[in-house]
Image (cartoon, coloured by chain):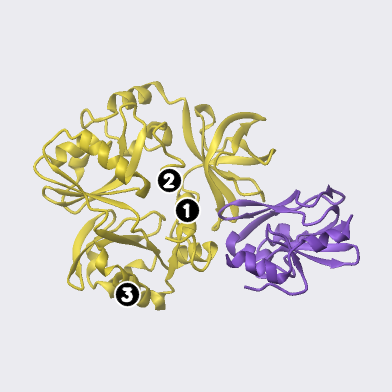
Chain colours: A yellow, B purple
Amino acid sequence: MPVQYSGILDEHQSVRERAGLFDISHMGEFRITGAGALGFLNHLLTNDATKLTVGKGQYSMICNDHGGIIDDLFVYRTNLEEYLMVVNASCIEKDYLWAQTHKSHPCQFEDCSHFYAAVALQGPSSPRILERVIPGAACQVHHHEIKRFLFQGKEIWIARTGYTGEDGFELFFDRTVALQVWGKILLDGREFGIKPCGLGARDTLRLEMGYPLNGSDLSENITPVEAGLGFAVSFGKGRFIGSEALLQEKENGPARKSVMFQMNGITPPPRSHYPILSDGVKVGEVTSGTLSPSLKMGIGMGMVETRFAEPGVPLQIEIRGKPYPATVVKKPIYKPGKAG
Amino acid sequence: MNIPKDLRYAETHEWIRADGDTATVGVTDHAQAELTDVVFVELPKIGTKVAAGAECAVVESVKAASDIYAPVSGEIVEVNQRLEAEPGLVNNDPYGEGWFFKIKMLAPEELRRLKTNESYAQQISK
């Protein structure tokens, strides 16, 4: 995926107001099958996979024994004893190796990343565009669901998920029809104003929502409790990899927490690794930052000492040696569905 | 890619237009395209003395922050304050309204060390 096609700001606005199409073929896909698949997923992942009825998906994480995040991902139940896991591109080998060496239940764990191409169709006009491409699909697949369809005789999995905060779909299919899928969506979406979108807009869109990016906001040294991802950790399901460490941290309270912040007034955009200050003293570090195209203000995420992790707390971001005022805010910074 | 003939170019993608002993500096069309949408420009203070090759401004796109270097030595005598409110001028009119600063040259002969439009075109085609 290139950084941009027509321009980051233009693509961003297109997704917020109409539709955008991202080539997300770089992402990894694992297929988990067999009688032990569910038991294994509940051992490997933080969220409770027993909640997944056929056709449902959920956000989840792979943690290490210390509760550090190895990867964050989406797992879908595609059949009774069959699951599809979509993971970050940079983590495919690492996740696969981890899963193979921690296999607790008899099942098949297969890396299908080489087989699948994938696109994300995102934005308020996405359902009407998908309706043209694959009639009937948009109304059959609801939020966080996945369903199998056919495209030119090939299997295509359509999930109502995404990384932009807008309504939209992620499509996973045989890579031999990748050009046809890409071309058909852009053609059918033309009258709705669809634009091809790159990595740049993908980053500004997800950051306005406060969605973390693994490698920037998440790492093996950061836990879901610190990252504010406790909603995707199930302590009720029994033991899983990292559960003891996470439970202890949850009870004691984490020493630091991820926050979303917004710059006050016109400032340079915050960037990862810039120091976060309180009254001139360093209390954390920016993990992701950009200029919000929707707000025209600098926004970002950062890891700060827990006592500063409250909406409304004033902080400063140090940019090239100068402190600029910022305020901790609630996620998301942008509420989808408000644009024209 | 637009590379006007009457300008000189630095390897670091600034252009310079001399008028007597004062010169106007901005970034090239190629640079603005590579930067992507410019969203913030930090300009030098008027009166700052700079050496050729010294960092003297910062241009920020959605993607990243990049340094702008003085192509020649001298003193900053004027800055384009419009860029503070309208940083997009750098993308829309890099050789015109999107200029960064004017510099009173200490040694105008330094201009001869900079690239012509042809050698700059060659550099960016590599």
Chain for disc number 3: A
Image x and y of residue A275, in percent: 60, 35
- Residue A131 lies in quadrant: bottom left
Q: Is residue A56 left or right of residue A301?
A: left
Pointer 1 residue:
A203
Q: Do callouts 1 and 2 mark residues in contact (Cβ within 8 Å)?
A: yes
Front residue (pair A117, B54): B54
Residue placed under numbered mark 3 in the picture: A184
Q: CA distance from mark 1 to mark 3?
A: 25 Å
Question: Residue at image x 8%, y 42%?
Answer: A35
**Callout 2, which amino acid?**
Leu
Q: Amino acid at mark 1?
A: Asp
Residue of label 2 = A213
Q: Earlier in the sequence, mark 1 or mark 2?
A: 1
Above or below, comparing residue B91 to residue A70 in the picture: below
Q: Give a yes or no on whether discs 1 and 2 share a subunit.
A: yes
User: Tag 2's secondary structure?
Assistant: loop
Q: Earlier in the sequence, mark 3 or mark 2?
A: 3
